[in-house]
Image (cartoon, rainbow, N blue to C red):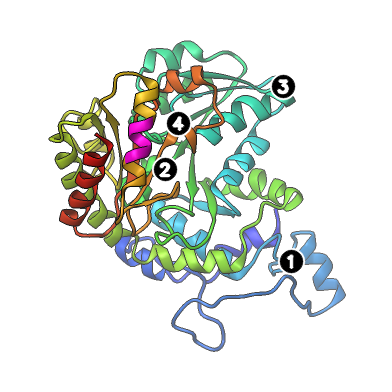
Amino acid sequence: MSSERKQEGAGNTAPAKWHEETLAVHAALAPSQYGENSEALYLTSGYEQPSAEAAAARFAGEEDGYTYSRLGNPTVTSFEQRLAAMELAPAAIATSTGMSAILLLCMSLLKSGDHVVCSHSMFGSTIKLIGSEFAKFGVTTSFVAQTNLDEWRAAVTPQTKLLFAETPTNPLTDVCDIAALADIARAAGAWLAVDNCFASPILQKPMTLGADIIVHSGTKSLDGQGRVMAGALCASADLVNNVFAPVIRSAGMTLSPFNAWVVLKGLETLGIRMRAQSANALAFARWLSAQPRIAKVFYPGLESHGQHALAMRQQSGLGGSVLSFELKADNATDAKAKAFAVLNHLNLAKICTNLGDTKTLAAHPATTSHGRLTEAQRAQAGIGQGLIRVSVGLEHVGDLETDFLQALTHAA
């Protein structure tokens, strides 16, 4: 166990009895000797050691103390503590991006001959990383329908070590039953990891529903203003300290102190933003549903969503800030042309593949986030050429409706 991991529990200023809103503001390392009110940003790659003996003990994990920022940094520790507290998780470990968090997850838990089960409607890069890149090293993957528990059960083999779910999914917002998947994973002796990027700990806390590991892209809602990249895994102290930390120490998918500080401050307003953006997204989704040029709207907050009741139970009664809609079209070529026309005529909303931002962002998943998948993989995931994903921000909903109405009119 590295000394930096052990230090996480020292000086945490946030009692577990505090409410979520309070934890979002106060969970962090204690202030330094200077008594700063805002958490300090420690921009340093290394740390001076009091003696050669202390340096040796700290590098060996026998004594608390920071040694090198690839292995640990006080600002990064504060971010880890705050996220873990908000997720009601025992511990967290930060990474440079959301995808590096998934890389750390797989590198730490899997070896040649192991098997993974995950949804075929997950984020495109996740599908490529697990299904293609790790296949080079002898890890096999079965992709199943997100909402079909029978398919998850049938896919499990004696070699299954990991069930990986994303809920809601990107971009179709499919919702899976976390508690039911946890039962399947336990019966198989496997881990259940849940990507909580869309919901965030404000709407959904997967570990309270039986998940073993929570995956985050801090680039999205945790930061909330599109400034930096970050990722994290939340899990038990044993997994963080003894399984994930040794790998990150060697592989170095480390979160920079500056990025950690930005996301740490972003967490302070996460609750306010997620609730406001969820309200905006619901109103906007209802408006989109009434537009004659739109075939279908995908949003968990709508009663028409296939897993609406489940989503409301799991997500604190809120649908989140991300939705997608499918344009009416004659064929794939027509659908793509219309989708591009809508995107190109937007003025307020911007074409950008990020999400969870305070600004409304729109993207064409088939040619961006899922562009590296084969046409068959996209078809299996339900991602057509007429699909547009929208991350709803904090603008006035009436302005968004006006912007999209004129864009839809031009596309027609």
Left or right: 102 in relation to 287: right
Residue named by callout 2:
196
The percent position of residue 285, horizontal first and vertical second, equals 20, 41
Callout 2, which amino acid?
A: Asn
Residue at the (42%, 13%) spot, across then down: 151
For residue 396, what is the image quadrant? bottom left
User: Which mark is in front, 4 or 3?
Assistant: 4
For the residues bearing labels 1 and 2, Cβ distance under 8 angstroms: no
Q: Nearer the viewer, residue 51 or 20?
A: 20
For disc 3, the neighbor class at 10 Å (few under 14, some 14 to 19, many from 20) is: some
The percent position of residue 227, horizontal first and vertical second, equals 48, 63
- Mark positioned earlier in the residue sequence (4 or 2): 2
User: Which mark is in front, 1 or 2?
Assistant: 2
User: What whole-number distance in Å separates the C-alpha atoms at marks 4 and 2?
Assistant: 22 Å
- Mark positioned earlier in the residue sequence (1 or 4): 1
Residue named by callout 1:
68
For the residues bearing labels 1 and 4, Cβ distance under 8 angstroms: no
Callout 4, which amino acid?
A: Ala
Tell me the magenta residue range: 337-341
Callout 1, which amino acid?
A: Tyr
Q: Secondary structure at mark 3?
A: loop
Q: Which of the labelled discs sits on residue 366, or is there none?
A: 4
